[in-house]
Amino acid sequence: MSGDFDDIRERLESIAEELADRAIEVLRASIEDGAKEMPIDEKRLTRARRAVEKAAHLLTDQQQGDDW
């Protein structure tokens, strides 16, 4: 059963990378615009990335033995 979730886990990891890349783009644009505070979009993207990373982690082999 360990391989059952590998595809989903890999897709989630890819999505997490995309979210991180997008957050960096937002930060760069904000810096170029001279913003003094962290942009809201960057914060939302970072929170979403963390949630997706947690979901991917839950699908790793080490979690297979955990009971609900």
Image (cartoon, rainbow, N blue to C red):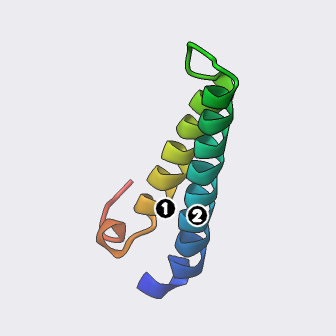
Whether the residues at callouts 1 and 2 have beta carbons within 8 Å, the answer is yes
Q: Where is residue 26 in the image (x, y as percent from the top left)?
A: 66, 37
Q: Residue 58's quadrant in the figure?
A: bottom left
11 or 41, which lies in front? 41
Could you tell whether 62 is left or right of 5 in the image?
left
Q: Distance of mark 1 from mark 2, alpha carbons?
A: 6 Å
Q: State the SS at label 1.
A: helix
Look at label 1 and name its amino acid: Ala
User: Vertically, is 33 above or below 12?
Assistant: above
26 or 19, which lies in front? 26
- Residue found at x 66% / y 30%: 32
> Which label belongs to residue 24?
none
Q: How many residues crowd mark 1 within 10 Å: few (<14), some (14–19), many (20+)? A: many
Q: Position of residue 14 (x, y in %)?
A: 59, 67
User: Vertically, is 18 above or below 49?
Assistant: below
Q: Quadrant of the N terminus?
A: bottom left
Q: Position of residue 12 (x, y in %)?
A: 58, 64
> Which label belongs to residue 56?
1
Q: Mark 2 points at which residue?
A: 12
- Residue found at x 63% / y 17%: 35
Look at label 2 and name its amino acid: Leu
57 or 29, which lies in front? 29
Could you tell whether 1 is left or right of 42 in the image?
left
- Residue found at x 63% / y 23%: 39
User: Vertically, is 7 above or below 66?
Assistant: below
Q: Which of marks 1 and 2 is nearer the N terminus?
A: 2
Q: Where is residue 31 in the image (x, y as percent from the top left)?
A: 60, 28
Could you tell whether 19 is left or right of 53 in the image?
right
